[in-house]
Amino acid sequence: MNAIVLGAGLCGLAAGMMLARDGHDVTVLERDAAPVPESPEAAWERWGRDGVAQFRQAHLLQARGRQVLDDELPDVRRALEAAGGLRLDAVDRMPETVADRAPWPGDERLMTLTARRTTIEQVLGRAAEAQDGLEVRRGVSVKSVETRRIGGRVHVAGVRDDTGRAHAADLVVDAGGRRSALPAMLADAGAGHVHEESADSGFLYYTRFFRSRDGRLPSLRGQFLIHYACFSVITIPSDAGTWSITVYASSRDRVLKGLRDPSRWTALVAACPLQAHWLDGVPITGILPMGGAIDRYRRFAGHGAGPVAGVASVGDAWACTNPSLGRGMALGLSHATMLRRVVSEHGDDRVGFADAWDEATERELTPWYRATVSTDRARLAEIDANRAGKAPAPPTDDAGRVRVALPAAMARDAEIFRAGSEMINCLTLPRDVLRRPGLAERILDVAGDDLAPPPGPSREQVLALMR
């Protein structure tokens, strides 16, 4: 099979390498012209990746993503460790309030490997350059797709770049990320409008990176992500003695737009006892703001005759959400693995592949998208209520009550801690974890009425810090 992959980011290169290792002829077309730097530090300092909006924002590879590297690309995992990637074990971060601290069978599933996005792409980019059967062409911008109709089904036959050159393909893989233009190209080519659901996530992000003064990293006092009344903080250890701190809040909170100012941002983080010590490092960036993150889901339904054949979208090109839960890279790598599997199952049967790809994506990944959007909407409602000086409305559904109780229960019970960590690490869907006999009831019982937020500034104190 001859495959064209659009985009040389994490998902595009991973998908291309997996297909090439199965004997397929793969070409990756990347619009950014800059070559892969020689080292991770050169990538951090100088690599221009204008096509990736979040290239120097905070990233976390959840355990499911590490599992994909172990199973599908073990050489990449080893190279990432050699480049300074940091191994993190969720069980090592179990709160001291959990009495049962003995290891359990299966704990190794909760281990992950973390690094800056620039480091991950540099390592993967170098590995892709050495991969037989894979060619990466940088500085190539795709402008249109070529289609034909067979038996009422739309088939993608290839793409055409901005020089007019045609690139024929049995399969076009869209790994163009959040900014993918492929749906518009398909519409222009007469393939029908792609079904799309899209809405602004409602959050603004303010990130700063630090480097250790002595090689040691700050201790994690709780989970990576901790919610306060009107904002949230994400702390992520990373490679080569670096880490990031991200504060995010409602995009409607005009006061917190003052977090662009380093002194206000620092004052707010310093007022959070669980994260203040993360400021004890050398800043290696200013405040990196990001807005406009959207929740978007796409499905290539065609003209009613079935999904468009000869094309597959992976990762953020298929669906993207608020990045604060850190699911993007793990689910994107899982999507690439799914692509490898479905291609191997259907060979040259383009229609069979299209139907199976649509079904597998809907069954295995769409529930993650829906769960993430639901969590985001609930969190945004909490923030907006607290910002207005009102108590957030208590959830009226069982899933909502369990969601609210889970952090307190994880801090007290070893089994619940591991169940929650499975969900956080994208290993098991929340709905499937909570279907385990008696678990939801146990979470509510262990949490009890003690649902107080973590220690941190009140809304009034936040307003004072922003002056």
Image (cartoon, helix red, strand yellow):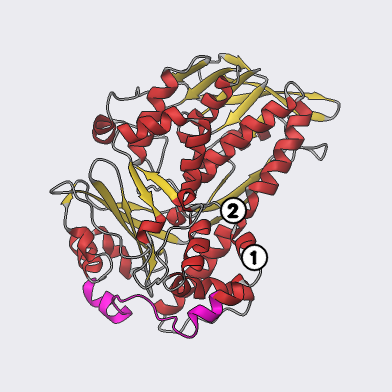
**Whole-number angstrom distance, CA of label 2 to CA of label 1:** 21 Å
Which disc number belongs to residue 369?
2
Name the residue: 38% across, 23% down: 126
- Depicted 424 relative to depicted 274: above or below: above
In the rendering, at what x and y percent does residue 18 appear?
Answer: 55, 26
Which disc number belongs to residue 179?
none
In the rendering, at what x and y percent does residue 367 appear?
Answer: 64, 54
Residue 362 visible in the snapshot? yes
- Depicted 132 relative to depicted 120: above or below: above
Which image quadrant is residue 269 in? bottom left
Q: Secondary structure at mark 1?
A: loop
Which image quadrant is residue 181 in? top right
Q: Assess disc 1: are there few (<14), some (14-19) or many (≥20) residues with their C-alpha within 10 Å of its C-alpha.
A: few
Write the start and end of the magenta stretch as one range. 443-466
Residue 401 visible in the snapshot? no
- Farthest residue, direction left: 213
Q: Amino acid at mark 2?
A: Tyr
Asked whether disc 2 touches disc 1, contact meaning CB atoms under 8 Å apart, the reply is no
Q: Assess disc 2: are there few (<14), some (14-19) or many (≥20) residues with their C-alpha within 10 Å of its C-alpha.
A: some
Say which label, 2 or 1, has the lower sequence index. Answer: 2
Which disc number belongs to residue 436?
1
